[in-house]
Amino acid sequence: MRCQPNLSRLLAIALCLGPLSCAHRPPTGARPTRERGHTPSALHGVWRSRGYGHVLRIAGTGWELFHVAGTFCYRDPRPDAAPEALFAWYQPLEGDALALSSAPGQTRYDFDRLAALPPACTDPSPWTADRIAALTAATFAELYPSTRARSLDWSARARTAASRLSATSDDAALFAALSELLAGVEDPHVELHAQVDGEERELTPGEAPTLQRLAGGGERAWLGAYKSGILEDVLRGTGRQVANHRVFWGRVDGIGYLNVLTLGAFDAHAPPEDATALEAVLDEALTAFSGARAVVVDVSNNRGGYDALGQRIAGRFAAQRHLAYTKVAFGARDARPQAFHVEPSARVRFTGPVYLLTSDVTVSAGETFTLLMRALPQVRHVGTTTRGALSDQLDKPLPNGWRLALPAEVYRDARGVDYEVTGIPPTIALEPFPAGDPLHGHARAVSRLMEDVRAGRLAGP
């Protein structure tokens, strides 16, 4: 889930260079799942999610989270797993069902009451290598939303994995089989983290072509050139890099410029979802943008983070409320798509022309931010197509202690278009990271965009 993004990668990338609240209206009747230290009795019992592969057993003594896929079920193996924190708010639904969320208005998980815990959840059979491979295949077959778009046959892949493994196969053989099982799934929200013979192994596919060209150690120099190009060339020495190095901003010759590298970790001394430092920076930047001819919002190198923070930024450019997108768990029967809106911020705003710049590096919450901005009538989308990985990343820790993650949702924009896999295409083409100019291409592209806006060569929305 994106409320728990891969911050280790996100933070490492960005370092080279008020508390969370939703920006849209919270659902009526949302209540905390802990009251005076206790779980309300209405929540006690066994519940199964619509989509997501979750079973919850809730009692006065605590919560237990189980993962289900196909014929498999197992208790979450993480010693620090705390489903009470993940599901901190609830709202009753019709038909002995309820909706849970981490915060009012954020991702909603619909659950139906079960008469009892499924027998598979207490199956004592050992988790041998062959069973874990079968579980992994079942998890993707049931929860992965891009199976058809990527032409994947999980039954055939499961049979291949089964032919490679037995109950006595070691970790090395299991990792090799899972690598083959997931081969060709070029999705940045798919991850496998394992430990084999005391060494960390991982699969993290789906890297952007721009970043693939930098493989072998070139990314650090590229990031350095990206930073200096913004501060020295685009903003001509008058710009600022602030909010824990995550935000650049400045104003040059009547054009405002705002560049957001991540949607999270804006304060090194606060939780990554905290918005206090971000809001302070936006107040200062948008005050400076007052009266500007236009503002360029650059998320061409945005690696994702928290959707709620993207809502806060988009709200700084909204004159009125707009539907941005809906989301629903893949394969969930009777689950209602959840709507997300851009809401005008109560703080300083800029409602003049805006040019949003994206690239193939723009991913995850950077892409939902793209949908939020595209919902605003004065925004024009410039650049290249985004990565095509909008769904939240769902953690599925495996019974042997390895960690699996995958997307499990379908996002659609206000017109009902799903951009998973394909990415979100701009309305004005501009290559921020030309292959022939990796170090200076971005600054030159942004400067050209700003000059075109200044000269009136780009028509308004």
Image: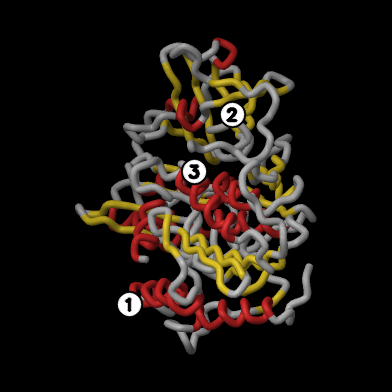
What is the crowding at mark 1: few (fewer than 14 residues within 10 Å), some, or many (at least 20)? few
Asked if residue 153 can be seen in this view, the reply is no
Residue designated by label 2: 100
Q: Is residue 39 left or right of residue 383?
A: left
Marks 2/3: CA distance?
23 Å
For the view shown, which residue lies furthest in the left direction? 198
Frontmost residue, 447 versus 422: 447
Residue type at numbered disc 2: Leu
Q: Which numbered tag is attached to residue 275?
A: 3
Task: Report how many numbered discs are placed on residues in the image.
Answer: 3
What is the crowding at mark 2: few (fewer than 14 residues within 10 Å), some, or many (at least 20)? many
Frontmost residue, 156 versus 255: 255
Q: Are marks 1 and 2 in contact (CB under 8 Å)?
A: no
For image coordinates 44% across by 64% down, the residue present is 240
Q: Estimate the x, y position of residue 124 in percent, counting from the top left.
A: 37, 29
Q: Are marks 2 and 3 in contact (CB under 8 Å)?
A: no
Q: Is residue 48 left or right of residue 27?
A: left
What is the crowding at mark 3: few (fewer than 14 residues within 10 Å), some, or many (at least 20)? many
- Where disc 3 sits, the SS reads loop
Q: Is residue 44 above or below residue 447?
A: above
Residue type at numbered disc 1: Gly
Dividing the picture into quadrants, the one containing residue 454 is bottom right
For image coordinates 73% across by 35% down, the residue present is 334
Dividing the picture into quadrants, the one containing residue 271 is top left
Residue designated by label 1: 216
Marks 1/2: CA distance?
43 Å
For the view shown, which residue lies furthest in the bottom direction? 436
Q: Is residue 436 above or below residue 282?
A: below
Q: Looking at the image, is mark 2 or mark 3 nearer the viewer?
A: 3
Q: Is residue 91 left or right of residue 154?
A: right
